[in-house]
Image (cartoon, rainbow, N blue to C red):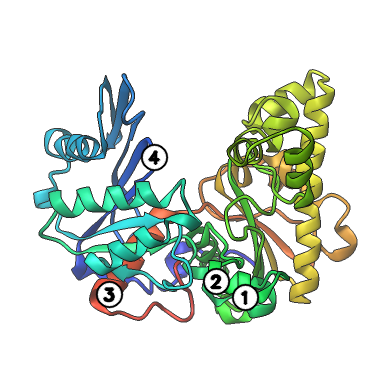
Amino acid sequence: MSIVPESERPNPYSAYGAHGSVLVLNSGSSSLKYQLVNPVGGEAIAAGIVERIGESSGSVRHTYAGNTTERELEVPNHAAALRLALGLFDEIGPRLADAGIHAVGHRVVHGGERFSRPVVIDDDVVAAIHELVPLAPLHNPANVQGIEVARELLADVPHVAVFDTAFFQALPPAAYTYAIDRDVARAHGVRRYGFHGTSHQYVAGKVARVLGRRVQDLNTIVLHLGNGASASAVRGGVPVDTSMGLTPLEGLVMGTRSGDVDPAVVFHLARNAGMSIDELDTLLNKRSGVKGLSGENDMRQLRRLVEEGDEDASLAFDVYVHRLKKYVGAYLAVLGRVDVVAFTAGVGENDARVRAAVCSGLEGLGIAVDEERNAARAGEPRIISPDWATTLVMVVPTMEELAIARQCVEAVEGLQPSAAVPAG
């Protein structure tokens, strides 16, 4: 298999041309990311981020037509953040009144078992996202706040919720069920939900499109490696397993999250270290991962420490890679045949050493990287495995905002996504 030139790939989204642009919002606890997207060509028309919302000093960065404007100012709340962003569109461009906005898309972290696809937002949807706060107490409240503010300020266009968990609602019961008391699990919604679903779906679809293949014919392992990290096994465009679970804590070693640990670690520390639930939550989510092992959660800084001979950093890197390699092997067993291993997100797209280390020793399974191809940098999907490898190893830049934009058009118009190349 080889990359099909862009000019030779059919664009299943050409029909979206009549639907204008989509404003994608990602509302976090102290930040608001936004991007104006063309759902046909896939380009970001403009983008920005408001940070340190609610703190004494905030900031905004707005990029349009190759120019970036940055300002420091106080941003008291999310309503002020969105008003600031909308004002920058009018001041710097492009004017939203002229952009033909067809919808506003909202990234929502947790959709529970209720939401398996994007939905047009009404009051009932907002209430349902509120009800799911116990499953995502760090994320869903901020998501809801962003939705409520945006619906007030942009009342003339439909708003769509796109859920991080939706793609993984297709997991088989054997993959999403935890082996705990079934009545307790049912009463409290305890199961594997998976996260980063928009990215995993987009990358699996993009792999098929750039290879000129039907997604139904490919088995793909997607490694989404950023500060948060997750893996998925995708058979024919349908997920069959993923590393994150009830929350985004389970699975791979991440920037500040532990990933998989023996659950009894929690009991041990509560009984013997006197740690409270909140302290344990902070330990595993914010003081673990590569930061907990080395003091650094930025992979670039971690590699600098490794090169300087720091033993803690070296161990952190080895633990990070070991866990990744375990998941690749496990998902190869789950899938039975792997056509593509795709690296994506900040670390996956930019760190050649991580990619090489993960694939090292897997040559007997047909998985390897070519040193020269792996070292090359490009903003487009590319193959980095040698010609003899039976499994392609690829770098595929993720574009979650584009995936959200296209799903928004589908939700508003009742369109069916292309079965051949979903989301990519």
Q: Residue 187 carries which label?
A: 2
Mark 2, secondary structure of its residue: helix
Q: Distance between the residues labelled 2 and 3?
A: 44 Å
Mark 4, secondary structure of its residue: loop
Q: Where is residue 361 in the image (x, y as percent from the top left)?
A: 88, 52
Pair 3/1: label in front? 1
Q: What residue sits 51% from the left and 65% below the top?
A: 206
Q: How far apart are marks 4 and 3 (CA)?
A: 36 Å
Q: How far apart are marks 2 and 1 (CA)?
A: 6 Å
**Residue 36 visible to an observer of this rendering:** no
As shown in the figure, which amino acid type bears the numbered disc 4?
Ser
Instruction: Specify whether 276 is left or right of 87.
Output: right
Pair 4/3: label in front? 4
- Answer above or below: position of 140 versus 390: above
The residue indicated by pointer 4 is 29
- Depth order, front residue of 407/183: 183
- Depth order, front residue of 168/359: 168
The residue indicated by pointer 1 is 183
Q: Residue 144 carries which label?
A: none
Q: Where is residue 237 in the image (x, y as percent from the top left)?
A: 56, 75
Q: Earlier in the sequence, mark 1 or mark 4?
A: 4
Q: What residue sits 69% from the left and 78% below the top?
A: 174
Pair 4/2: label in front? 2
Q: Distance between the residues labelled 1 and 4?
A: 33 Å
- Answer above or below: position of 294 versus 134: above
Q: Position of residue 352 (x, y in %)?
A: 69, 41
C-beta proximity under 8 Å, tags 2 and 1:
yes
As shown in the figure, which amino acid type bears the numbered disc 2?
Ala
The residue indicated by pointer 3 is 15
- Depth order, front residue of 20/53: 53
Q: How far apart are marks 3 and 1 (CA)?
A: 47 Å
